[in-house]
Image (cartoon, rainbow, N blue to C red):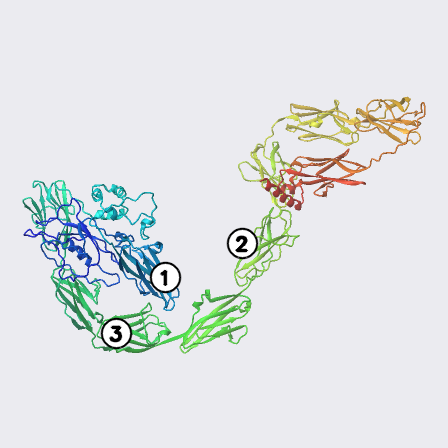
């Protein structure tokens, strides 16, 4: 807020006005024009009366150039009387610096004020003011810098002397040309410096070059000077302002500011606001390059016509309009500089409405001296209205005991009197009359505090008391004590004390020192008082001198001396070097005593010590000698237990620090042997601060204790270190396989005898197949224990294992391989364990073999039982049983037992299969029932001589009674053997005869229950030959034969006859027809002229009869009619190489179900057929059956597994050639590894099958 001029009501009612100090030196007035014109409808200025109304005048100030971060003032509004309107403007212009490059004028005191009557305004002058008006002046700070930015400092780097010629400010008229020149010497510059031209603070002129602005650079090689020029052509009025030139080169920087003043040729008395706030052009071609309006977007609108005389008063329109309408009015009347218009409009005083409550309001501001009295007077239009006074918004109420605020009334005047004004009275005051309110501000001016009594100079000695006294003009005044221009610290721990009493102020130094010498001053608001203080030293007296000392190394060192005067500081020196206090060295001073203490003395602490009191030429000296016995510093080696470990074969060098003064003699010893420095492989060396032991190639024998002996004049010391030579460990002992599983085993071993001098960290285990030579690592992480379980081995394959020991040095050689072992797995548990029979003392159990048996096979079963409610399992069979049925005997009647069965093989016992429920040992009657097998429900037929062995099972409890009858008669035991068991009956005939045929009746009885069955047995034999074979008729080439059936049909129906013929000449028999069923036949196509005999065999289900019945007579084929000569025919050659008429077809099969492959081949002679799988012939494999019938070749694969899949081929070969067809067989569903092992598939084929199965499954996924 600008400070108003001091104005106060006088007791006689005269007004006080402000005038400039007459003692101020006159200064030349700069060429700055100012137009001030009264606004329309403004009330005339009051020049009479007690309280003239202040007039607010705009005080234009030319912008001060910015250099080195200086601030530029902005215009201020000042309240002055009618007399001082023009003088105030002139005085403000005079205070402005004429040039930025010239030094600023000296400061003047503006404290003097006089009360003079208001003179008439001075006459107009061309160099000062053209016209007086309250109209907004035509004054611009230039487009380059906004007025609100003038107070902001400019941040520039520190200046250096680059410019040898700086551009100077100038003044031109509108339309004129001007040039500014800057020169830089390039004598020490390696390249051209960088120069920038600015207008204001931030607008770079490099982007504004054009018709009105040109920048030029030249370089004179002879003088080594760079010349930079800026030419302004046809200047416009808005080109005026502050300019700046900046030159930079690497880290150097220089800057210079200068002003450009653009004068108008003529100015009319009346100014058009629209031309005053319109830019030079609206972005047209002739717009100024320094005008921002040239950067605006071009608009298609016509420029309003500029008249010399405005048709309307825009100021009146703006004053009466709302703020949101300013922009619309400005564009309507062609005003483009809206920002400047708003700033100027804000500074103009609006017309005040006539108050209804106040005839005269408070002045805008009042000023009073501190401690003085001020009267605030208002004149009321209505004296009856209630009046309230406020200070900073708080109501002022009268207090009877205090006379701070006094309220007075004189007619219509209401007066507030403020007595003894203080700084807290500097505030905003307001008075409210009804709903109206007027405000003012009171400024309390603090009077300067003057010094009435100066400080006197003081001269004293050290440790004396100093008091500096000064007296000021006001009690309780704030003063500041300084020493050599620096404020004296007066805190609780300070040596300086400050005291004040009334008008007097003291600075006290209780214990003066030489540092207190200097100039002390007291600074008040109205002046400064100075005085010199001189503190001198007292004569030095040595009370106790330093003493020579001998100290043992590491012991504390304490030196002491005593001097007078006390409190004199001093410095300690050792061998001429200053000693500084630290953690080990303490320097103490107490009054006259000075001490130097060293906590742990070292060799370096020996020397000449000197104490020099500060300010004196005398010094105190002494010598210190440090004694150090020899020592061995093994702790610095950081070896655990002083043991040095080295790998065998490496070089060892141990350096042990030693100390001692003088240098000790060192002897190394191992046992009783002294190690010399001339040794070849093992040697000892001694240096100034350490001794070393060197072993070039460490060996196992170098392990041991090494002793070090040190001797010097101060004593003897010794130490020992242990050298440990480490190597890889020996191999472990041969591993022992303690337990074997299906794909695993358990192994153990003993650690190696020699661990290499380093603890065993773990073991590596390897295995291999016995037939192989390739070992495989089983663990990649060290095994800490001496046991291990190898896994993922193939069952039934012999293996060997070995072990490596590992220590910190490396891996040992492998141990000897273990004995070969074969992984064997126990079988799975037996399946389908059920109760087969129960009696009063026995229980019969039966079960099925385990699903998985493994390579170890199955040795037998172990049956156990226990009484229900107990865990006492008893083995019933001491020897293994191979059967899947067993009867437990000797059981207590009516006991409940639990039964379980284990499968036993070489790998051990399997998991037991336990019956889920208990069994009651008590026989139960079960009616008999005969279960006749399906093939015995029909006639059972056998040939004569074959064995008959029929098993007929039955059921029933207790054991049924079985009886047999044949045709109602008892069976002859000499002919038929019958054996009965508890569950079946067996008829056995070792060599069947036809008399054994017949119906056998079987009867099964259990007490009163009976069950019967009939078994029909038929024993058949070859039939006899036919009877009575005769030739009925012969005609042409035909013969009719007739015969009767044989007398003996062989106990079976005749199924057919076989007829053969024979030529009488050769009697070689040829079959004419087979399986003929009738008893008569005609033989055709007989050869004419031949005579034939015929014979016939009878045939039943057993076969042809042993003999044949031949015709007694022969049949002669005679020629009838003319004789026909038969033509000769060449027999057709039916021979051909094999050819497949039907190829093999790719087939899918399901595992466990038979599959067949079929193809057909034609060849003559009959070919030999070979079936192959994967190019390998199938020979004598029970899983395959091969058939060939009438050229149709069939391969049957019985219950195939996925292993049976592959490429199958059929090859036919005869004398004329061969042929081959192929197909692919895929078997869906597979077998596990154990199932393939159980089927007896070789291991290499199982591996191949498992890998093929994985390949097939992956694409399907």
Which structural element holds mark 2? loop
Give the answer, above or below, for where 728 lies relative to 383: below
List the residue tagged with mark 1.
Answer: 217
The answer to whether residue 1229 shows anywhere in this view is yes
Marks 3 and 1, the one that precedes in the sequence: 1
Q: Nearer the viewer, residue 649 or 927?
A: 649
Is 370 displayed left or right of 1028 in the figure?
left
Q: Estimate the x, y position of residue 563 in percent, counting from the top left.
A: 24, 75
List the residue tagged with mark 2.
Answer: 781
Is 413 displayed left or right of 1138 in the figure?
left
Crowding around mark 1 (Cα neighbors within 10 Å: few <14, some 14 to 19, many 20+) is few
Which structural element holds mark 3? loop
- Tag in front: 2 or 3: 3
The answer to whether residue 859 shows anywhere in this view is no
Q: Nearer the viewer, residue 1197 or 804?
A: 1197
Q: Residue at x 62, y 57 (%)?
A: 816
Q: Estimate the x, y position of residue 844 in percent, counting from the top left.
A: 62, 34
Spatial separation of the CA atoms under disc 3 and disc 1: 63 Å
The image quadrant of residue 916 is: top right
Q: Estimate the x, y position of residue 1046 in percent, counting from the top left.
A: 84, 23
- Tag in front: 3 or 1: 1
Spatial separation of the CA atoms under disc 1 and disc 2: 80 Å
List the residue tagged with mark 3.
Answer: 614
């Amino acid at each position: 807020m600008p400070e108003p001029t001091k104005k106060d009501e006088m007791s006689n009612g005269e007004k006080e006005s402000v005038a400039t100090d007459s003692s101020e030196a006159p200064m030349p007035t700069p060429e700055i024009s100012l137009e001030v014109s009264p606004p329309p409808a403004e009330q005339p200025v009051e020049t009479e009366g007690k309280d003239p109304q202040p007039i607010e005048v705009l005080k234009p100030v030319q912008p001060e150039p910015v250099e080195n971060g200086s601030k530029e003032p902005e215009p201020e509004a000042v309240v002055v009387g009618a007399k001082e309107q023009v003088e105030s403007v002139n005085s403000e212009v005079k205070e402005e610096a004429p040039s930025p490059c010239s030094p600023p004028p000296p400061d003047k005191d503006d404290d003097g004020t006089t009360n003079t009557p208001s003179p008439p305004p001075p006459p107009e002058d061309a160099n000062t003011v053209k016209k007086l008006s309250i109209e907004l002046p035509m004054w611009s700070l230039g487009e380059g810098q906004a007025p609100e930015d003038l107070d902001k400092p400019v941040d520039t780097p520190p200046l250096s002397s680059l410019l040898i010629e700086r551009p100077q400010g100038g003044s031109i008229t509108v339309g004129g040309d001007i040039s500014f020149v800057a020169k830089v010497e390039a004598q020490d510059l390696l390249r051209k410096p960088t120069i920038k031209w600015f207008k204001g603070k931030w607008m770079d002129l490099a982007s504004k070059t054009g018709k009105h602005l040109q920048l030029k650079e030249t370089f004179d090689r002879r003088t080594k000077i760079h010349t930079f020029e800026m030419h302004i052509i046809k200047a416009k009025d808005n080109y005026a302002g502050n300019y700046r030139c900046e030159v930079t080169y690497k880290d150097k920087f220089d800057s210079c500011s200068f002003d450009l003043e653009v004068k108008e040729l003529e100015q009319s008395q009346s100014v058009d606001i629209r031309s005053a706030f319109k830019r030079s052009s609206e972005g047209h071609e002739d717009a100024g390059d320094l005008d921002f309006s040239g950067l605006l977007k071009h608009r298609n609108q016509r420029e309003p016509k500029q008249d010399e005389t405005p048709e309307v008063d825009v100021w009146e329109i703006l004053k009466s309009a709302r703020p949101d309408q300013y922009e619309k009015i400005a564009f309507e009347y062609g005003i483009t500089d809206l920002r400047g218009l708003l700033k100027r409009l804000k500074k103009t005083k609006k017309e005040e409405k006539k108050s209804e409550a106040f005839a005269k309001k408070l002045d805008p501001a009042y000023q009073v001296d501190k401690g003085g009295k001020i009267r605030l007077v208002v004149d009321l239009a209505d004296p009856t209205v209630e009046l309230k006074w406020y200070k900073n918004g708080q109501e002022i109420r009268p207090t009877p005991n205090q006379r701070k605020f006094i309220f007075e009334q004189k007619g219509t005047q209401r007066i507030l009197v403020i007595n003894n004004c203080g700084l807290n009275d500097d505030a905003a005051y307001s008075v409210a009359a009804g709903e109206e309110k007027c405000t003012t501000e009171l400024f309390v001016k603090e009077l300067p505090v003057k010094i009435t009594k100066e400080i006197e100079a003081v001269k004293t000695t050290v440790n004396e008391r100093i008091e500096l006294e000064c007296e000021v003009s006001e009690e309780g005044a704030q003063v500041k004590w300084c020493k050599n221009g620096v404020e004296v610290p007066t805190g609780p721990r300070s040596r300086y004390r400050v005291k004040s009493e009334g008008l007097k102020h003291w600075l006290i130094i209780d214990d003066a020192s030489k540092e207190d010498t200097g100039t002390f001053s007291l600074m008040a608001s109205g002046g400064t008082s100075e005085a010199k203080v001189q503190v001198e030293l007292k004569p030095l007296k040595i009370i106790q001198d330093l003493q020579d000392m001998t100290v043992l190394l590491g012991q504390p060192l304490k030196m002491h001396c005593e001097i007078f005067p006390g409190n004199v500081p001093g410095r300690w020196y050792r061998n001429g070097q200053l000693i500084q206090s630290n953690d080990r060295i303490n320097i103490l001073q107490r009054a006259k005593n000075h001490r130097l203490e060293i906590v742990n003395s070292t060799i370096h602490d020996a020397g000449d010590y000197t104490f020099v009191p500060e300010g004196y030429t005398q010094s105190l000296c002494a010598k210190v000698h440090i004694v150090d016995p020899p020592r061995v510093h093994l702790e610095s080696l950081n070896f655990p237990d002083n043991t040095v470990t080295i790998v065998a074969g490496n070089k060892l060098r141990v350096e042990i620090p030693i100390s001692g003064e003088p240098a000790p003699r060192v002897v190394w010893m191992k046992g009783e042997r002294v190690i010399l420095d001339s040794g070849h492989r093992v040697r000892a060396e001694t240096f100034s601060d350490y001794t070393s032991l060197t072993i070039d190639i460490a060996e196992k024998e170098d392990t041991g204790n090494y002793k070090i002996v040190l001797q010097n004049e101060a004593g003897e010391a010794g130490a020992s270190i242990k050298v440990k030579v480490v190597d890889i460990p020996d191999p472990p002992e041969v591993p022992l396989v303690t337990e074997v599983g299906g794909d695993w085993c358990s192994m153990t071993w003993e650690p190696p005898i020699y661990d290499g001098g380093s603890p065993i960290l773990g073991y590596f285990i390897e295995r291999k197949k016995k037939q192989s030579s390739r070992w495989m690592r089983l663990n990649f992480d060290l095994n800490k224990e001496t046991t291990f379980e190898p896994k993922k081995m193939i069952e039934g394959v012999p293996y060997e294992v070995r072990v490596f020991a590992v220590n910190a040095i490396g891996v040992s050689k492998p141990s000897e391989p273990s004995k070969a072992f074969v992984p064997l797995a126990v079988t799975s548990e037996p399946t389908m364990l059920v109760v087969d029979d129960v009696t009063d003392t026995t229980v019969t159990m039966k079960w099925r073999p385990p699903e998985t048996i493994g390579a170890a096979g199955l040795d037998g079963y172990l049956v156990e039982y226990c009484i229900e409610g107990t865990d006492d399992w008893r083995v019933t069979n001491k020897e293994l049983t191979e059967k899947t049925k067993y009867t437990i005997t000797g059981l207590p009647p009516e006991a409940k037992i639990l039964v379980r069965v284990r499968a036993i093989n070489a790998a051990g016992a399997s998991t037991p299969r336990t019956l889920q429920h208990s069994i009651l040992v008590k026989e139960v009657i079960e009616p008999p029932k005969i279960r006749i097998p399906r093939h015995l429900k029909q006639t059972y037929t056998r040939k004569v001589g074959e064995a008959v062995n029929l098993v007929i099972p039955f059921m029933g409890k207790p054991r049924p009674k079985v009886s047999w009858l044949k045709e109602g008669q008892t069976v002859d035991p000499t002919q038929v053997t019958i054996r009965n068991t508890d569950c079946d009956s067996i008829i056995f005939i070792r060599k069947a005869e036809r008399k054994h045929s017949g119906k056998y009746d079987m009867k099964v009885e259990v007490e009163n229950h009976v069950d019967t069955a009939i078994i029909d047995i038929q024993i058949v034999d070859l039939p006899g030959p036919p009877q009575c074979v005769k030739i009925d008729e012969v005609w042409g080439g035909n013969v009719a034969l007739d015969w009767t059936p044989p007398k003996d049909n062989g106990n079976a129906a005749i199924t057919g006859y076989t007829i053969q013929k024979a030529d009488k000449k050769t009697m070689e028999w040829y079959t004419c027809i087979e399986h003929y069923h009738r008893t008569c036949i005609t033989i055709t196509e007989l050869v004419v002229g031949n005579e034939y005999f015929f014979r016939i065999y009878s045939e039943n289900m057993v076969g042809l009869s042993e003999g044949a019945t031949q015709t007694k007579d022969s049949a002669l084929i005679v020629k009838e009619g003319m004789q026909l000569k038969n033509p000769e025919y060449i027999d057709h050659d039916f021979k051909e190489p094999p050819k497949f008429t039907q190829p093999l077809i790719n087939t899918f099969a399901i595992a466990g179900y038979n599959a067949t492959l079929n193809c057909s081949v034609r060849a003559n002679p009959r070919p030999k057929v070979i079936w192959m799988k994967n190019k390998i012939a199938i020979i004598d494999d029970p899983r395959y059956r091969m058939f060939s019938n009438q050229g149709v070749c069939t391969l049957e694969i019985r219950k195939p597994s996925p292993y049976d899949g592959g490429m199958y081929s059929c090859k036919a070969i005869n004398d004329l050639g061969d042929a081959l067809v192929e197909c692919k067989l895929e078997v869906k569903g597979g077998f596990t590894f154990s199932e393939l092992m159980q089927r007896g598939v070789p291991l290499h084929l199982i591996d191949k099958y498992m890998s093929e199965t994985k390949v097939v499954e992956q694409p399907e996924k």
